[in-house]
Every structure is written in C-alpha cells, then in structure tokens.
Amino acid sequence: MPLSEHEQRMLDEIENALYADDPKFASSVRKTSGPGGRRPAGLVVVLGLVGVALLVGGLALDFKPGGFPVLSLVGFLVMFAAGVLAMRSAPSKRSSGGTTGSGSRVPGAGRTSPKAADGRSYSSRMEDRFRRRFEQ
C-alpha cells in the first residue's frame, strides 16, 4: 500500500532527524535494512523440506548404523538449522530500528522526545487513559 503525501513527509522528517541525532546509528541501520540484509525465504523452505525428507527417510530406510537412525538425526539438524535461519532473518521490532520490509521507516518510530505535543510525558498520558477507562 503506497503512502500518502503527508505520511511520506513525516517519514522524511523522521529520517532527517535520525541522521541529525545519530549519524553512526543511521548509517548502520541503512546498511542492514537493504535487500541483502534478509535471507531468502526459499532457502528456509527448501532446507525445511530436505530436513523432513531426511527425517522420514531415515526412519523408513533400514540404514541404522549401531541401531541408531543417523539419517533421521541429520534430517532433524537440517530442520533445526532452517528454523534458526528463519528466526534470524525474520524482522523483529527490536532489531529492525523501526523499519518495514521495504526499508521505509514506520511513522513515530524515530521520535526522539518523550513528550507529546501538549507537553505531557508518555507515562502521564497512559495513566490518564487508564483512569478514564475505569471512570466511565
């Protein structure tokens, strides 16, 4: 979904503020958020399918050196590696630095001031919302 002009302007302002506040962090975010920063999902799927095939094939075949299904163990390890690869390549809120998959920043993610436009802090606004819920 494309952004509106207002949202695009907000993103540009946030990006400029990030570059002005912490240029070192901004350059590191720019380096890791590009298309080369994520591993292809196809690799994860292929590894998972190969792992399942090895796991099931190891149980179905009569190849058990020492009475232990080694091929199934290898299949499990391949599936485990696919899971780890999927977890590491998935975008997380903590490590993405407020970016979406396309590299554009989420509005409000780069906010540097803990105060709102009315001058109150985030915690005081949350307290007010909490009180209003129970007063109604």
Image (cartoon, rainbow, N blue to C red):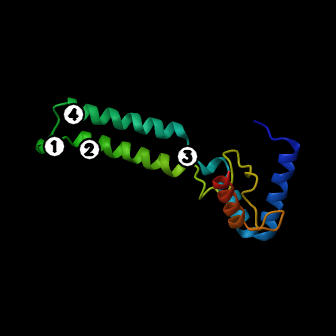
Q: Amino acid at mark 1?
A: Phe
Lower position in the chain sequence, tag 4 or tag 3? 3
Q: Quadrant of residue 109?
A: bottom right
Q: Is residue 53 above or below residue 16?
A: above
Q: CA distance from mark 2 to mark 4?
A: 10 Å
Q: Amino acid at mark 3?
A: Arg
Q: CA distance from mark 4 to mark 1?
A: 10 Å
Q: Amino acid at mark 4?
A: Leu
Residue beneath label 1, please? Answer: 68
Q: CA distance from mark 3 to mark 2?
A: 25 Å
Lower position in the chain sequence, tag 2 or tag 4? 4
**In front: 46, or 107?**
107
The residue depicted at 25 percent of the width and 40 percent of the height is 71
The residue depicted at 53 percent of the width and 39 percent of the height is 41
Q: Quadrant of residue 21?
A: bottom right
- Mark 1 residue element: loop
The residue depicted at 15 percent of the width and 43 percent of the height is 68
Residue beneath label 4, please? Answer: 59
Lower position in the chain sequence, tag 2 or tag 1? 1
Residue beneath label 3, please? Answer: 39
Q: Is residue 70 above or below residue 110?
A: above
Tell me whether the residue at label 2 lies in contact with that at label 1, contact meaning CB atoms closer than 8 angstroms: yes
Lower position in the chain sequence, tag 3 or tag 1? 3
Residue 29, how many percent across, how many down? 68, 60
Mark sitting on residue 73: 2
Relative to 63, 106 lies left or right: right
Badge 1: how crowded within 10 Å, few (<14), some, or many (20+)?
few
Image quadrant occupied by the N terminus: top right
**In front: 89, or 122?**
122
Q: Amino acid at mark 2?
A: Leu
